[in-house]
Amino acid sequence: MTTDTAVAVTQAVQKTQQLRFIDLLFKGGWVMVPLLILAFLGLVIFIERYLTIRRASRDESNLMQQVKQSIITGKLDSAIAICKNSNTPLGRMLQKGLLRIGRPVKDIEGAIENIGKLEVSKLEKNISILGIIAGIAPMVGFVGTIAGVIQIFYNISLTDNISMGIIAGGLYVKMITSASGLIIGIITYVGYHILNIMVDRIILKMETDAIEFIDLLEEPGR
């Protein structure tokens, strides 16, 4: 190996070692802009929904016990005030049921169910957008790669140069968009299902407490 060749190889190795992640992103081209927008949007939605659902999923066993005790002792106004002050999905459900006491149990049950559906829809707000991002991010990245490959072969047709270095050098840059799209899609897909699992747990808890509340109203002497 000649001195010039050794120097060239050394410089190439150093250049490869100095290639940073941020440099790769810039090499991805204009397609990285919509991908970064999708990533930012997905992150914002996930954090906002996660914090909201986390607050709604806190333990409400104490609230249920207080409401039951107030109903048993005949303190209906106190039970309503407790539910109102809780400012939680379960509290709003029970409050609606308490305001309907005196009507047939079916009416009370229907009112609670309607409020429950409304509360669930609030929790699920914008979660579907994460599913959309998880689906389109990989496709956007793939479009960037295909556009880059087309450009590579167009340049080859103009220069009539089929050097493997030119092809490989262009391809590794264009594959960055596909890799980025897949990473964004996978992370968003996981976040989407994490939020859905959290919402499902809240729904199960709300349904359980609603049944317990209805059973309490149907007890003899109530």
Image (cartoon, rainbow, N blue to C red):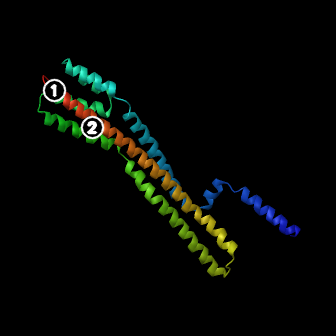
45 w.r.t. 82: above or below: below
Q: Within 10 Å of the Cα at label 1, are there few (<14), some (14-19), or many (20+) other Cα atoms?
A: few
- What is the total number of numbered labels drawn onto the structure image? 2
- The answer, for residue 133, to whether it is visible in the render is yes
Residue 162, position in %: x, y? 67, 79
- For residue 91, which quarter of the picture? top left
Q: Residue at x 45, y 60 (%)?
A: 136
Residue at x 31%, y 36% (from the top left corner): 205
The kind of residue tagged 1 is: Glu
Residue 169: % across, % down? 66, 68
Q: CA distance from mark 1 to mark 2?
A: 18 Å
- Residue pointed to by mark 1: 219
Dot 1: what SS?
Answer: loop
Residue 207 - label:
2
Tell me the element at label 2.
Answer: helix
Residue 77 higher or lower than 145, as above or below: above
Q: Are marks 1 and 2 in contact (CB under 8 Å)?
A: no
Query: Which label number is shown at residue 97?
Result: none
Residue positioned 43% across, 40% down in the render: 50
Give the x, y percent position of residue 139: 47, 63
Question: As rendered, which of 85 and 199 lies closer to the eye?
Answer: 199
Residue 30 visible here: no
**Which amino acid, mark 2?**
Glu
Q: Quadrant of the N terminus?
A: bottom right
When the figure is inspected, residue 17 is found, relative to residue 202, above or below; the finding is: below
| Front disc: 1 or 2 | 1
Q: Quadrant of residue 94?
A: top left
Residue 18 x/y as whole percent: 72, 55
Q: Residues within 10 Å of mark 2 (few under 14, many from 20)?
A: some
Q: Is residue 19 left or right of residue 125?
A: right
In terms of sequence position, does the residue under pointer 1 or pointer 2 come before the other? 2
At 12% from the left and 28% from the top, the residue drawn is 102
